[in-house]
Amino acid sequence: MSIIACSSNQSGDHPIEYIFHPRSIAIVGISADLPKLWIKRLYLESLIKSKYPGQVYLVNPKGGEMDGLPIYRSVRDIPGPVDHVVISVPAVHTPKIMEECRDIGVKVAHVFSSGYAETGEPDRVELQNRLVAIARQANIRIIGPNCLGIFYPRGRIGLSPDLSMEPGSVGFLCQSGGNVTFMARHAAARGLRFSKIVSYGNACDINECDLLDYFASDPETKVIAAYIEGAHDGLRLLKVLKNAAAAKPVIVFKGGFSPDGLRAAASHTGSLAGADTVWDGLLKQVGAIRVYSIEEMVDMLVALLRVKPPKGMNVCAIGHGGGASVMATDELSRAGFRLTPIPENIRSELKEFVDLANSMLRNPLDLGTGFVPDAMELIKNMGSRPPAEFLREIAASGGMPRAKRLNALLKQWPGLDLVVYHHGFDISPLPVERSRAPGGPGSILLAANACELPKALVLHSMGNDDSFAASIDVRGLAADLGLPLFLSMRGAAVALRKLVDYSMAYPERLVGLDVPPNKVGTDLGCSQELRH
Amino acid sequence: MSIIACSSNQSGDHPIEYIFHPRSIAIVGISADLPKLWIKRLYLESLIKSKYPGQVYLVNPKGGEMDGLPIYRSVRDIPGPVDHVVISVPAVHTPKIMEECRDIGVKVAHVFSSGYAETGEPDRVELQNRLVAIARQANIRIIGPNCLGIFYPRGRIGLSPDLSMEPGSVGFLCQSGGNVTFMARHAAARGLRFSKIVSYGNACDINECDLLDYFASDPETKVIAAYIEGAHDGLRLLKVLKNAAAAKPVIVFKGGFSPDGLRAAASHTGSLAGADTVWDGLLKQVGAIRVYSIEEMVDMLVALLRVKPPKGMNVCAIGHGGGASVMATDELSRAGFRLTPIPENIRSELKEFVDLANSMLRNPLDLGTGFVPDAMELIKNMGSRPPAEFLREIAASGGMPRAKRLNALLKQWPGLDLVVYHHGFDISPLPVERSRAPGGPGSILLAANACELPKALVLHSMGNDDSFAASIDVRGLAADLGLPLFLSMRGAAVALRKLVDYSMAYPERLVGLDVPPNKVGTDLGCSQELRH
């Protein structure tokens, strides 16, 4: 057994800091039988893959062994101290397990099992209460029941083998297990990483207040994201949320905001969801950022962590396609941005390398065939090399000539606050092919990368499997380079508008974010977040 | 040269019917040089691939040959009559080409080239006016300039080699070329097909009024979709739109609805876009359905052509995942639907095969592990067979036992108007693998397929490349089976709400749509639209 030494934050003295630093983890209810096999994959395989440095114990009354580890028949049979237990047995058996945990001095019980208060059945509510009573008596903290538990990359506590173990700065508390994996995977695909995630389910003990309070003081967490279905203590929530929101940006997705949704939340996690107007007032009062979907939450995180806050609402939209440019204008415009015309001196310089035909030399700026020479050169020079690797090198060397010229012109535009580069994969009338995609989209990515103004990059309009596949390399590289990558113009516009509002209302809260410089150019693009 | 015999609608006597039935097509400005090579791919290769039965002529002053066809040096050198010309030469040369077209009796000139009125430059406006003057004199109709032209699957007139040539019932007029390909590809991926598409650009001659008027009387078109940036004759537009909307459902996406968007539209297609309030009033007055993106337009088409209109707002949401179920409820609820609790007798029958734990047996209904036995059986029986082929056979044989039982229970629910089945690919904490995806998502698809009530199927939450890839087979099969497939719950909720409103306000307009029966079961699922 080894003491965890990999965490940079052992010094924190928050009352629940220790839940992230177990010396050992026992998985109770592990089994090779279907469908319980997925508990093995979810926890045992994740811990092995994440190289969890503590001791892992397996428990099942049937005994035996798995992956070279003995399976103990009871928690009581485990030969060493157990800090953390993952309990995955039918709910009715969990009080007995909790008693065993009490007897051997367990500190944290994560109850994966469901079938408690959320069912609304009186005997199931009682079952949950019994768990809490046993745990209180023994000073055991419960995470759950009905949840996925803890994901802590720095502490090498994995959760699901395919989540990135690269540590980041987003702390996520989430009352739903499914939203943890959707959020973690989607955020990773957009280049974001997490400090810690806690999926806390019914919150019979550790709840949203504990976690908001924890993340507020956690130095590893720079932005807090929360999916919350219900409040367990309104007054305390107001207090901790106010404190957390004052310390760093807090994004809240309140699940169950509609009347029927309130009832659904009760049925999902046994939550008393609270009237939506109360939540809305609360979030506004403390200055938390409210979103209405996981996608919006990720968009908002990208805006906060990847976009240098624009000083005003003047935006230039630059991309390929007339219809796409008109639609981009509408989306940005209805989010409150202004697309003022390109100054005449810049326009006349643009005419030197962008043909009037098939382009829009105003604002929006449709490059038409303006970048085609760059794109053709990219395709030619790439040869058979992997597109992302090739484009990454071009990015490191400063990018393509037309993009450089365009970005130099943009810097001369007085009062321009933000540049939104965009490329729609399906706007090309020719079949979209992965091998050629780095040309057009690649030249937009390189231009966005080299842009020194506050900026965003929208790679979108993937309407079918072919165009989605064609976008893989360029999207992946944008995420890897730490570019502010959005996958829809509407999503980008909404998040960017919220960023402007937030940065004006609470400039001091953005200070610690270390948004990457707007030109990542020569450092091979590894953003500060990714370099941690 | 052969006379077109493949069109089912030669009898139409609409003044522009003939533009869809050219006996021959000349492509002027074809070239093997980059970047003009894509004109070859876009038009010549499409016509070859679509087996266009008329004569194809190629024109370029340099002469030579291409794909076994001679390249004539001038339009005047073409040895036979030419009905339709695609003009792709620099704008300044187009008046000369138009004069040649006049001289040899061309009927329709599609001007692909851009660089006319849309640039806002006086000499370019004049250039466009000259084109029109020559064409009027010679009784030539112009499509464009600055557009992709005609796509007519029944007439085997292809446009871009990867668009499906299977004829359908959606008529689409589109002022943007990029939106044609995005729309055509995305709609196809959702199982929809087109009667005709006309990309009409600057609309210097044939405009939105001509096309709306045409589609209104076109028996091959059951629903009209329109992306319009500007009106060219307000009074006529009101008249034709009123007439078209009375004849069949008309969906309008007005590009350039924001103040800056108005200016963008002028810059894109030289359109006088008109105040948004005027458009909004106009569309409401005639009972057209307004949407705000291509994705919304496709969602609305799926709702109209694939969902039997619900008689009221009572919906049951059925799927996998607690958080997903809460979010589904919120989205449906804020679109105006009601999720009333499952009647107690149905709930108690549900308890017989859906475990209380890890599920929500109310409404929303989170199946939890309820379909797991079905899913495991599917995976086991599928073996190494292609997932879509295997699932298609199971669908044809009536589906899986639990789904049958669930659907039988739903039929006993008094006042239930709509069932929304949903599956989020990334809600599974285990890595999403394509080979296993047919299990969970497949069992949801089969349940939706067998449901006899008005229904929708939402396959969503594909947060990264892996989950997107894992969804390919099930999404593809849902589209092929003619199921009402949506890719976001919000999109589904908005479109379904509009469907309910529309069907209540204008029930007579839905009569001709032939929405597939809600159970496609034993006919191998080929929807009526796809059987055309």
Image: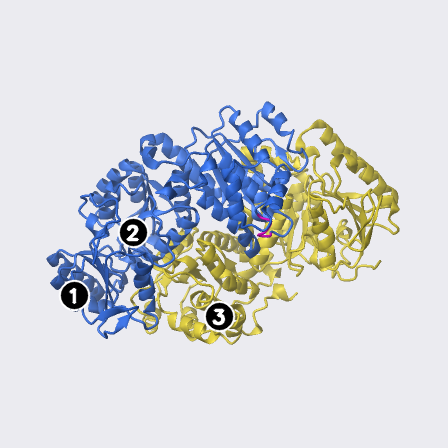
Chain colours: A blue, B yellow
If you read the primary sequence from the N terminus, does the residue marked by circle 1 or circle 2 appear first? 1
Local secondary structure at mark 3: helix
Identify the mark at residue A48; answer none if there is no mark. none
Task: Give the alpha-carbon distance from disc 3 to disc 1, as whole Å.
Answer: 53 Å
Q: In which quarter of the image is residue A13?
A: top left
x and y percentages locating residue B415 in the rendered image: 42, 64
Q: Is mark 1 on a helix, strand or loop?
A: loop
Residue drawn 59% across the image and 68% down it: B526
Q: Residue at x 66, y 61 (%)?
A: B166
User: How many callouts does the rendering have?
Assistant: 3
Distance from Cα at disc 1 to Cα at disc 2: 25 Å
Q: What element carries label 2?
A: loop
In the image, the segment drawn in magenta is: A433-437
Chain of residue at mark 2:
A
Badge 3 amino acid: Ala
Q: What residue type is labelled 1?
A: Pro
Residue that badge 1 annotates: A79
Crowding at dot 1, Cα within 10 Å, few <14 / some 14-19 / many 20+, comes out as few
Nearer the observer, A1 or A288: A1
- Quarter of the image for the N terminus of chain A: give it: bottom left
The residue pinned by badge 2 equals A152
User: Can marks 3 and 1 be said to lie on one chain?
Assistant: no
Residue A371, horizontal then vertical, whole percent: 61, 38
Residue B512 drawn above or below residue A317: below
Q: Which of B440 and B274 is in front in this view?
A: B440
Q: How far apart are marks 3 and 2 (CA)?
A: 43 Å
Instruction: Tell us which disc is closer to us: 3 or 2.
Output: 2
Badge 2 crowding class, 10 Å Cα cut-off, few under 14, some 14 to 19, many 20 or more, is: many
Whether pointer 3 and pointer 2 mark residues with C-beta atoms closer than 8 Å, the reply is: no
